[in-house]
Image (cartoon, rainbow, N blue to C red):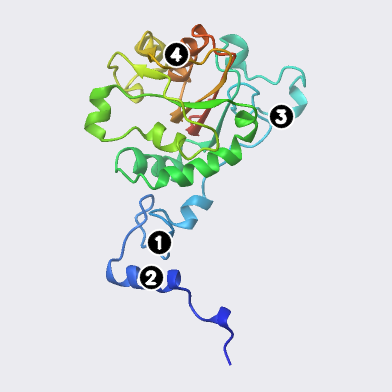
Amino acid sequence: MLSASKFPTIREIADGLIAVLLAPACAACDRPLDRPTHGPVCQPCWNSILPITPPTCDTCGDPLPSWRVISLEHRLCPHCRRRGTRVTRARAIGEYSGSLRSIVHALKYDGRRSLAKQLAARIAAHGADVLDGAHCVVPVPLHRSRQRARGFNQAAEIARHLPVPVHDALERVRATQSQTDLAAARRHANVRNAFALRRRGNVRGRIVVLVDDVSTTGATLDACAGVLLDAGAREVRALTAARAVLR
């Protein structure tokens, strides 16, 4: 006699029916989904994300070559030692490549907004030290023209699923060229004076965590951090779904 646990659950039955009748494909790899009720990305794609593992730079989160060549008091990558940043600590789920890149693109360009909740859960796990003690998370804003065209702000979608209150403290006051189209040297100039504090964006004395989908050179995060610090924020940290790792 079969025990109750041997019978398929309603969710398993639904997965089977949807897979047979609709044959949905994974938003990342385009292979058929075995469990479509669990989201638009298959589990193998989630499992294949390349995490950023220690040792990492205390500031930007980039991987460092070895513990043996790092001072325990100053665990900073060469970029952060040379240039510095107004973001005191940044973390990401993993490298902006492979399946994580495809997942971010599915959210950002294909409108798969349900992925924001799954990304947020992984961001919270990888960035627990960044969220610790934070008063609010601030999504990096889109310019109103770009948000109108896209229909949503992917950073705001991720932020609202994090375990810290969301504060829409910033607005993008100048439309900018996409950072992905620019060389690294031009990205800081591209976002200079592009952000401003909203009328009700009080952050004085607060520890603020910026949230975005991807960090490449960190220029956008640094520009936002400058506005928040000028407005009296005590500290600005950052969390992103992915990071373009500087080798």
Q: Looking at this view, name the residue that lies furthest to the bottom.
A: 1
Return the residue at label 3: 66
Whole-number angstrom distance, CA of label 3 to CA of label 2: 48 Å
Return the residue at label 2: 14
Q: Dot 1 lies on which element?
A: helix
Residue depth check, mark 3 versus mark 1: number of the one nearer the observer: 1
Amino acid identity at mark 2: Ala
Q: Residue 106 bears which disc, if any?
A: none
Mark 2, residues whose alpha carbon is within 10 Å: few (<14), some, or many (≥20)? some
Amino acid identity at mark 3: Ser
Q: Position of residue 132 (x, y in %)?
A: 64, 30
Q: Dot 3 lies on which element?
A: loop
Say above or below: 202 vs 91. Answer: above
Give the left or right position of residue 164, taking residue 187 as reference. right
Mark 3, residues whose alpha carbon is within 10 Å: few (<14), some, or many (≥20)? few
Label whose residue precedes the other's in the sequence (3 or 2): 2
Label whose residue precedes the other's in the sequence (4 or 2): 2
Q: Looking at this view, name the residue that lies furthest to the front.
A: 200
Amino acid identity at mark 1: Thr
Residue at 44% x, 57% y: name it. 42
Toward the viewer: 122 or 229? Answer: 229
Return the residue at label 4: 223
CB under 8 Å between callouts 2 and 1?
yes
Q: Residue 37 bears which disc, if any?
A: 1
Mark 1, residues whose alpha carbon is within 10 Å: few (<14), some, or many (≥20)? some
Name the quarter where the C terminus is drawn: top right
Name the quarter where the N terminus is drawn: bottom right
Q: Position of residue 48 (x, y in %)?
A: 52, 50
Say above or below: 47 vs 201. Answer: below
Label whose residue precedes the other's in the sequence (2 or 1): 2
Amino acid identity at mark 4: Ala
Label whose residue precedes the other's in the sequence (1 or 4): 1
